[in-house]
Amino acid sequence: MSGSLDCARDDVDNRRMRVLNKSFAVSTTGKGTYEITDKIEAIVRESEVENGVVTVFTQHTSCSLIVMENADPTARRDLEKFFDRLVPENADYFEHDAEGADDMPSHIRMVLTRTSETIPIVDGRMQLGTWQGIFLFEHRRASHRRKIVVTVMGQ
Amino acid sequence: MSGSLDCARDDVDNRRMRVLNKSFAVSTTGKGTYEITDKIEAIVRESEVENGVVTVFTQHTSCSLIVMENADPTARRDLEKFFDRLVPENADYFEHDAEGADDMPSHIRMVLTRTSETIPIVDGRMQLGTWQGIFLFEHRRASHRRKIVVTVMGQ
Amino acid sequence: MSGSLDCARDDVDNRRMRVLNKSFAVSTTGKGTYEITDKIEAIVRESEVENGVVTVFTQHTSCSLIVMENADPTARRDLEKFFDRLVPENADYFEHDAEGADDMPSHIRMVLTRTSETIPIVDGRMQLGTWQGIFLFEHRRASHRRKIVVTVMGQ
């Protein structure tokens, strides 16, 4: 009887699911990419999840998330130049411009990129590729305080 | 012995993971954005998950999901005008036009936006930012019945 | 006493969460779309998860994931032509071109599409719509070996 109970408890412990929700803020100082990989890695370590996923979510409609090449800064600079050309400010058909010329383009750039990203965790480590970093992509010119919510789930 | 068992059971109950899968349909009447935030919030409440994530998934290749500014309708109108310009109908190089001029553009607009989105749940509430709403983005002109699958997972 | 224990164990068994992480490689031979739906379905079956989600993640910054129309190959061909026009090679403002003319465009095309995708599982089956397939979208001209990480989580 006691053996059976121990067995049941081991079962629970070994397979116990953990859910950790944490948030942090990023202070941005104008349009551009801000790396947040280290902050997310720290939350994954804190969760002690060995096997599962981490979801990153940004709570805004004028900034977004991207996974991007993290070694050569010219890659991110070219990306930003591309988006400035793809979604021009002052398009003559924009009605939504109460907050300035970068208001509507910021929503469009957000829609074209990502609000949530989910990354696998194996053996306690986020499974990013060699050149992958996670970045907040700020689309507004003015300084902003951006909130990121991170959820780690797994065993 | 009985104490140990109670302890084991509490452990199970407190950390019990729940998974709730539900789907619903959205009737669309032409190109545009259709808010579905309330439907997803209702499923999150029904799940009684306090801490976890909700995944929203659309089962189609000619509509998509976006998280978007939900206060000022001009923001969504400008977004739609941008997509009409970015992905023109009747591009002379399109081969796939069996279902009309909005057929191929609808697949491209879907690929440029999202099929799934994952939103954290903390204290039983979906962690959307103040101005964030979840929308079905319909890319076809004709009326359609679109199916959304929602999965809530957590404790 | 024995009855209570059995009850506790059933509880654990019925609601036992499973997490399965697996990866596989895709050999690509130039720009284009490569279907990976079958590989992901096989991992979902192997997991024996009945109710949950599967997350697909690509570990690269010059290829990406898309959910796309899987019936008519002309739809994917038109999609590729669209991306060739949207993100031109040899833009005169690109600085990041160490690996050739398709280097920077590949990062931009990746950012405009997806790195992770999450699909619900109900009754042991991935809930893709009738015309949905999951594809690796290769953005480089040269042959590459691409790694995909798949995480199945649920009960």
Image (cartoon, coloured by chain):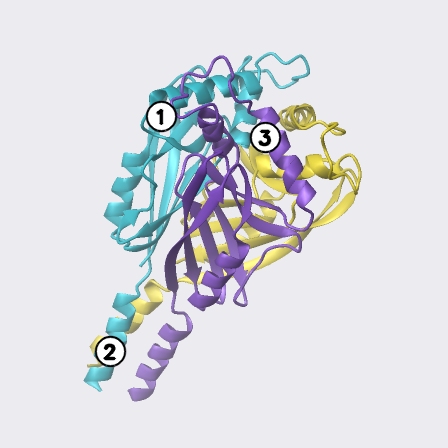
Chain colours: A yellow, B purple, C cyan
Instruction: Residue C106: give x, y in percent of width and height.
Output: 52, 22
Q: Are marks 1 and 2 in contact (CB under 8 Å)?
A: no
Instruction: Residue C81: give x, y in percent of width and height.
Output: 47, 17
Residue at numbered disc 1 = C34
- The residue at the point 48 percent across, 63 percent down is B42
A112 or B35, which is in the foreground?
Answer: B35
A68 or C139, which is in the foreground?
Answer: C139
Question: Which callout, 1 or 3, points to the residue nearer the camera?
Answer: 3
- The residue at the point 77 percent across, 37 percent down is A141
Label 2 neighbourhood size at 10 Å, few (<14), some (14-19), many (20+)?
few
Query: In which quadrant of the rendered view does residue B81 lie?
Result: top right
- Mark 2: secondary structure: helix
C74 or B49, which is in the foreground?
Answer: C74
| Number of the label disc, if any, that sits on residue C7 | 2
Distance in Å between CA atoms under marks 1 and 3: 26 Å
Looking at the image, tell me whether mark 1 or mark 2 is earlier in sequence order.
2
- The residue at the point 52 percent across, 32 percent down is B112
Label 3 neighbourhood size at 10 Å, few (<14), some (14-19), many (20+)?
some
Instruction: Residue C122: give x, y in percent of width and height.
Output: 30, 53
Instruction: Residue B99: give x, y in percent of width and height.
Output: 40, 26
